Image (tube, grey):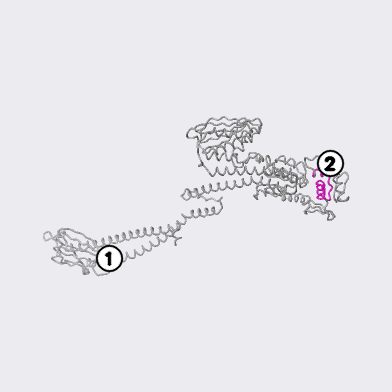
Amino acid sequence: MTSLLHSIRWRVQAWHAVVLLAVILAFCAVTYRLAWDNQLRRVDRAIMQSERELIRSLVDLLPASPVTGKPEPFSPARLLEHLRATRPVVPPAVASRFQGTEPGYNYFSIRDADGRVLLQSPNTPADLAIPPAAAGSFTDDWRNVGDRRETLRRNPEGMSSLFGADLTPEREEMRRFAWSLGTAGLGVWVLGLLGGWWLAGRAIRPIQVISATATRIADGNLAERIDPSGTDSELDQLGRVLNASFDRLHAALEQQKLFTADASHELKTPVTILLAETQRALKRDRPAAEYRAVLETCQAAAERMRHLTESLLVLARQEATGPHGPREHCDLAALLRDTADQLRPLATARQLTLETDLQSAACLGDPSALAILATNLVANALQHHDRPGGTVRVSCCTEDGRATFTVTDDGPGIPPKHLPNIFSRFYRADQARTGGSGHSGLGLAIARSVAANHGGTITAENLPVRGARFTVTLLAGARPPTR
Amino acid sequence: MRVLVIEDDPLLLQSLAASLREELFAVDTAADGEEGLYKARETAYDAIVLDVMLPRLDGWGVLAGLRPARRTPVLMLTARDAVPDRVKGLNLGADDYLTKPFDLDELLARLRALIRRTSGQTQAVLRIGELALDTAARRVELAGAEIVLTAREYGLLEYLALHRGEVVTRTTLYEHLFDENDSSLSNLLDVHVSNLRKKLGRDLILTRRGHGYSIA
């Protein structure tokens, strides 16, 4: 039962049943009322018709004027007087209308101001009650007494005339009408319920589809998506919102998978070297020099693994920190000067010149992360330079309110087809593992991650003649640097 | 047996070459795909060890360039162990694959099996009369007694045994026993054959004058 109460379809159906029932009941009540009023009006017209005929027959009985010999103009007073005086006999044609007590019979009673009966039909009910009237007024009342409909008129002379009709046939008709109305209403209600059930099912079918799809996605089928109906309905919008969320989650998960796969892939080569070298060395006894050579190879492989794992850690930390890392005001110029000093030995070893053009540029950020960013860019430029005697130039300044630094080299540049991908993890323009150089394929990915975390951007471009330039823009510091 | 190792990682290349040389293979090396393809086309190697990720021309490219002209057996090394990668390699004409990191012994065993299969042999131990040649352990026994051979002598005997019944020219022998850095003179072959005859009996290796050598 609880599950029924929790089902949207059942709840919609229950409310629909209640509302539909109320509407149908109200409709039936109004219809019944109108039909009854209609019946009454019909009865009233019939009563008035009988009344007119009776009065006309009575008027016809009035004696002609003794003076003119012509019928005198009719007046109620004359009629009253005539009735009092003569107690006329109603012509049989008219009297036949007021006979018997079969259902629907008519009756009448005419009395004077004192309540004395002047003329009445033989079938006048015994319980007929005519309330005393205020004299001198003209009234015309319609009333229902039990199963009878009556009209009571009084004129200022005090004559009251009551005409009535039995309502039993109308009552019977209305009972039959009520039955058919009730049956029809019930039928409409049941049809309405069926229609409502169908509609509710139709309305929540997209929800069920969404739910089923979401369940399959939760079960691991991450590539599946909710099929939009193509309309712009609320559920379609919900589907699109969910799809967008699934896309983001899927992309994040795929990225994570790719990252893990790449990382393990990158670790496989040094592990292979370690295994191959140690297995070879252990196959037989060797001179010390050979063992030394094996150990050196193993050391190189291990160092490569260390470099790789360190880079992975830095990258993971950068991505975990996001844009909420520690922030302090620092001077890019000082930071870059330190970086250049640290990398000068590498430049010398590769017979390159490392130039600096550093103007004080305040920026807001994490100095250690920014140092990694700068080191990676400069080391990248130094390592990919192909000509001894070349130059790598580091400069910084504040431009358009943003702290900017560039690393420019006159090396081979970046092949245009690789430009869009060089910031991807483990992407290498030459598809080669650079082996012993300690290059992990993560340097530029880390650089981009750091820049993004600082609300900045990093771009790479080839220079028109020769070489490449990396440009980093960062949020400028809010106040001048203190050092 | 002469093999070509195509691998871009200098440390791994050096390590693999050293391991194979210690196992009495003659080893040539190539550090990128283009160089590897060139060498593979120029020389009739007994087997090629080919890494998939290579600069300039990747392993798939090398395979595509090699087949169908050369039927040299190729053992592919791949860091990705996804089934599609392996299937792709095998479909392109690779004969076997190994995923990194691998065991050196497995690499050697697979390489020997490849070479054996290519010459039509299925057993690791080749028997010629009373002579038993264990290609896995590189041991030679004559009537149950182990005979100690030098690396060259063993290589010469193994090659002739694997191509039993064929006449193997001196050039072929020279190609398969010495690597690209070896400048031994070809008349050294006669010395090795003579030594083998001393150790294993005069009738084992026949000389076809003007043609070469064979084991009947």
The three-letter code of the residue at mark 1 reads Leu
- Asked if residue B48 lies in the magenta stretch, the reply is no
Question: What is the number of the mark on residue A167?
Answer: 1
Instruction: Please tell me which residue lies in front, B19 or A481.
Output: A481
Q: Would you say residue A36 is visible in this rendering? A: yes
In the rendering, which numbered label is found on residue A251? none
Q: Quadrant of residue A297?
A: top right
Q: Position of residue A286 (x, y in %)?
A: 75, 46
Q: Which residues are magenta?
A: B148-176
Q: Of the residues tagged 1 and 2, which is closer to the observer?
A: 2
Which corner quadrant of the image does residue A338 belong to? top right
The kind of residue on which mark 2 rests is Ser
**x then y, percent, for residue A31:** 33, 59
From the top left corner, tell me how far across and down residue A159 is, in percent: 16, 62
Q: Which residue: 58% across, 44% down?
A: A313
Residue B107, percent across and down? 72, 49
Magenta stretch secondary structure, dominant: helix
